[in-house]
Amino acid sequence: MTLRIHFTVEDLARTRIADGPAPCIELTTAARHLQERAHVVRLGAWRHRTLTALPPDARMVLALMPSRGRITDFLSGVNATTPAELIEQIRSTPRGRIRASLEQTARHQPLPSWARQLPDDPLLLRQLCDSLEAMAGHALVPHWQEVQALAAADAAVRSRQMIGGGVEALLARVNPRRVRWQAPVLEIAMVSGLDADVHLAGQGMLLQPSVFAVEAPVVDLDALPQPVLTYPVARLQEGATTPLFAAGPSGGGRAAPAPAPVADVVGSMLGHTRAAVLHTIAHHPGCSTQQLAVLVGIAKASASEHATTLRNAGLIDTHRDRRTTAHVATPTGIAVLNAPSGRP
């Protein structure tokens, strides 16, 4: 069964890539994976570690986030940029929206008996939000830095695809196993078996990279201001299956180690963090300062300072378009990175 999304010229012009991971999508998808046994290699270690640490009362929210079926809208339809902001927004959801969301879910699947009391029971709602916060604290927050890094790397890949072939090339390569571009139609093989035709009518589409959506695309046609297609980040589509978060929670802002030749030669000239910045720009051409900071594991201000130094030295160029920046290594920068390591 296939979902066929029809694009006009206006839709192609308005289609864009999200500038980072969506905490709501990552958390709801992670909640589904906690209740399944699929993707043992990629998610098995993370799942075991999370479930072992998760206190029993933190599992309350999973009743509204089942592994199959609808996730109640007031828990899934939130626009936030960080897990903490997501939780805060859900805690402040108006009672009317909670009631309407639960009524909508009940039309499609059974709800636990206590769920009907949520709009009128502040204590019960607080318990649910505490459960959600605890789950996020174990399943997502410890790995958020790595999630951001994977999304930033994906953005660099997609930017190169757009530069090389425009939006149509991007759509053709966003998830080749499940998504096929047959101009002017995007054909998506849905796990749900949905078979339908959808016309975007000039809205365009937001392409949202995801780490926890490890294989299947997720489509939200009702999202505002435009429909969303969630797809696995590029690393999950490359080569053999590898574990995610295998080393446990990521560290707190430490710079990523540079490869040995960079650390031996360039690091001795520039300093190891600046060498890592140059190496990252060379391997992710077109990355923004924010993406660079996430990939290296340093503050945005520090990434900007190092990029300025490298640019003044002629090792990188920075292209600006309005408020965005795109860093690329110069031929001199590439030559520095390719300098002999001095090893026998």
Image (cartoon, grey):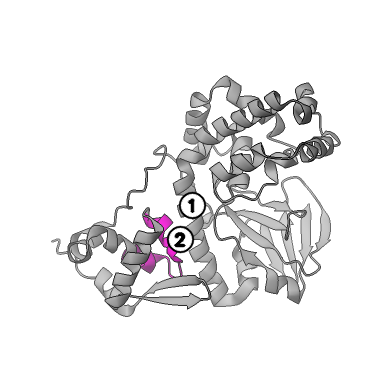
Under tag 1, what secondary structure?
helix
Quadrant housing the C terminus: bottom left
Residue closest to the eye, 241 or 160? 160
Q: Is residue 285 magenta?
A: yes
- Residue 291's label in the rendered image is 2
- Residue 76's label in the rendered image is none
Q: Can you see residue 35?
A: no
Query: Residue extending furthest right?
Result: 107
Q: Amino acid at mark 1?
A: Gln
Percent across and percent down for residue 250 are 40, 42
Percent across and percent down for residue 308 are 33, 71
Q: Can you see residue 193?
A: yes
Percent across and percent down for residue 168 are 65, 72
Look at 73% across and 50% down and name the residue there: 190
Under tag 2, what secondary structure?
helix
Residue closest to the eye, 135 or 11? 135
Q: Which residues are magenta?
A: 278-296
Residue carrying label 1: 148
Q: Amino acid at mark 2?
A: Gln
Look at 53% across and 69% down and name the residue there: 159
SS majority, magenta? helix
Crowding at label 1, few (<14), some or many (≥20) Cα neighbours within 10 Å? many
Residue 289 position (above or below residue 318): above
In the shown orientation, is residue 255 left or right of residue 196? left
In the shown orientation, is residue 19 left or right of residue 1? left
Residue 320 position (above or below residue 43): below
Q: Which quadrant would residue 187 be assigned to in this image?
A: bottom right
Crowding at label 2, few (<14), some or many (≥20) Cα neighbours within 10 Å? many
Q: CA distance from mark 1 to mark 2?
A: 8 Å
Look at 74% across and 42% down and name the residue there: 73
Cβ atoms under marks 1 and 2 closer than 8 Å: no
